[in-house]
Image: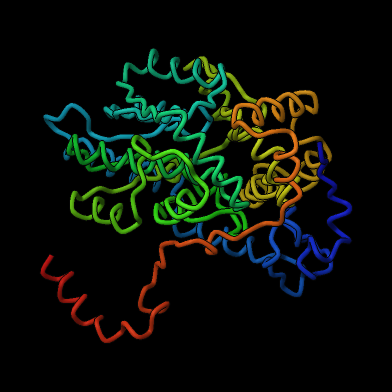
Amino acid sequence: MKVYNEEQLKIDLDSNFGRSYQQCAISVMDTIADPAIKFDEKGISNYYTEFKKAKEENVYEGELGKKKLNEIVLQIKGKGKNKKYDCITGVSGGVDSTYVALKAKELGLRPLIVHFDNGWNSERANQNIQNIIENTGFDLYTLVVDWNEFRDLQRAYFKANVVDIEALTDHAIICTLYKLAKEHNIKYILSGANIVTEHILPNHWIWGKTDGINIRAIHRKFGEVKLKTFPTYSAFRIELLKKRNGIQTIPLLDYIKYNKAKAKIEIQEKLGWKDYGGKHFESVFTRFYQGYILPVKFGIDKRKAHLSTLIFDGQIRKEEALKELQNPIYDEGLMAEDYEFVRKKLGFSEQEFENYFDAPRVEHDAFEHDKRNIWKNYPALKILRPIWNLVKKMR
C-alpha cells in the first residue's frame, strides 16, 4: 500500500503544479489542496472572501432566518395540501441529511425520504437510516441499483483515472429525487447542502453531478455491463424536469444557525444517531475514497476544505484545524482492511489495484461531457441562437 506524504508534496513541484507551497493565512487551504488557489497581499486566500459573500447572500439566521423559514414552510404546506407528501429529501445516514429529516419533522412537513443503496453502506449507516424512519414516521423509498451495474460503473471510473468517482452516487440520487418529485407532484426538494460547513469545494476535486453524458461516455469506453437500472440523465433533462414541474430545491440548513457539533448532539438524543468518525464516512467506499484514494492518488485531503469552512464560520480555530490535520485521516488498521475489501469487492487483482494508484490523473473533460455553454464552445452555432431562444419562449 502506498502512503500519503504531505511534506513531500510541499516540495514536489510536479505534484504542486509548478507552484511553491503556500497556505492561507486564515484557513488551512493551500496550494496542494487547490493548484488554482489565489492569495491577496496579506496571504488570505480567495476562499475567505467567497465564503463571506456566499454566507451574506444565502444564509439567514436569527429572527430573519425564522421569518424566511416560516414563509418557506407555509409555501411547502400550501403546495402540498391534499397530497401524500409535501416535499422530498435524500438521506445517507450522515449528519446533514439526518438533521434535515429531524427539522422537517419538527416543522410539521411530510417528506418522502429517499435513500440510494449502492452496495457500500456500513451497518451503522443502515441503522441510522432505520432510526430516522422509526422516529419520524416518514415513508422511505430506497433506490436499489443492480450491483453488477454499479460495480461496473465504478470499475470504469477507476480505469478512466478520473477524480470524481462519487459523482456516480450523487448523480443517481439527484435523478431519483427529480423523478419521484414528478411522479408524486412534489414541488420542493429539501437539501442538506449548506454554506457554513460545505461551501469550500475546489473545482479541482469534482465534476458536475448532473452530467450524465460524462458518465455514459466513461462507461462506454471502459464498462462491460449494460446499464438497465442505473439512471443517467443529462443536465438538460434534469433542468427540464425541474422547470416543467415547478420543482424548487430548498437548502433548509441555510435558514437556521447550523452548527455541526451541536447538530450531532441533537440527532443523537432525538433520533439515536451514531457517529462514523469522519465526514461522509457512512459509506465504506466513501470512507476509502476520501481517506485513501483522494490523498494517495490525487494529493487531495478533503479535511482541509471541511475544516477551513468551519474556520471561516467561526466554529473552530485554525490551531484546532492544524492539530486535526496531524492525525491520520482514519484508523490505519481499518484503512488496510478497507483497501483489501474495496479491491476484492470491485474485482481488481492486487497488481491492477497497485497500477491504478501509479497511473496519472485524467481529467473528466477528456471524455464526452455536457458542454454547458454550447454557444461558447461552438461559435459556429451562434447563427442558430435566435431560433433556439424562440423555441424556448414557445415552450
Residue 131 figure quarter: top left
Residue 185 figure quarter: top left
In this rendering, the answer to whether 96 lies above or below 294 is: above
Left or right of 300 on screen, residue 313 = left
| Residue 85 vs residue 180, the one in the foreground | 180
In this rendering, the answer to whether 12 lies above or below 107 is: below
Q: Position of residue 124 (x, y in %)?
A: 56, 18
Say how the picture is coloured. Answer: rainbow
| Residue 40 vs residue 157, the one in the foreground | 157
Furthest-front residue in view? 224
Q: Residue at x 52, y 48 (%)?
A: 222
Left or right of 5 on screen, residue 156 = left
Q: Where is residue 332 in the image (x, y as percent from the top left)?
A: 80, 28
Q: Where is residue 66 in the image (x, y as percent from the top left)?
A: 37, 41
Left or right of 124 on screen, residue 288 = right
Q: Where is residue 7 in the image (x, y as percent from the top left)?
A: 88, 52
Which image quarter is the C terminus in? bottom left
Count of numbered badges drawn on the protein: 0
Q: Residue at x 56, y 46 (%)?
A: 157
Which image quarter is the N terminus in? top right
In this rendering, the answer to whether 353 lies above or below 111 is: below
Q: Residue at x 65, y 40 (%)?
A: 290
Q: Residue at x 30, y 59 (%)?
A: 236
Left or right of 127 on screen, residue 86 = left
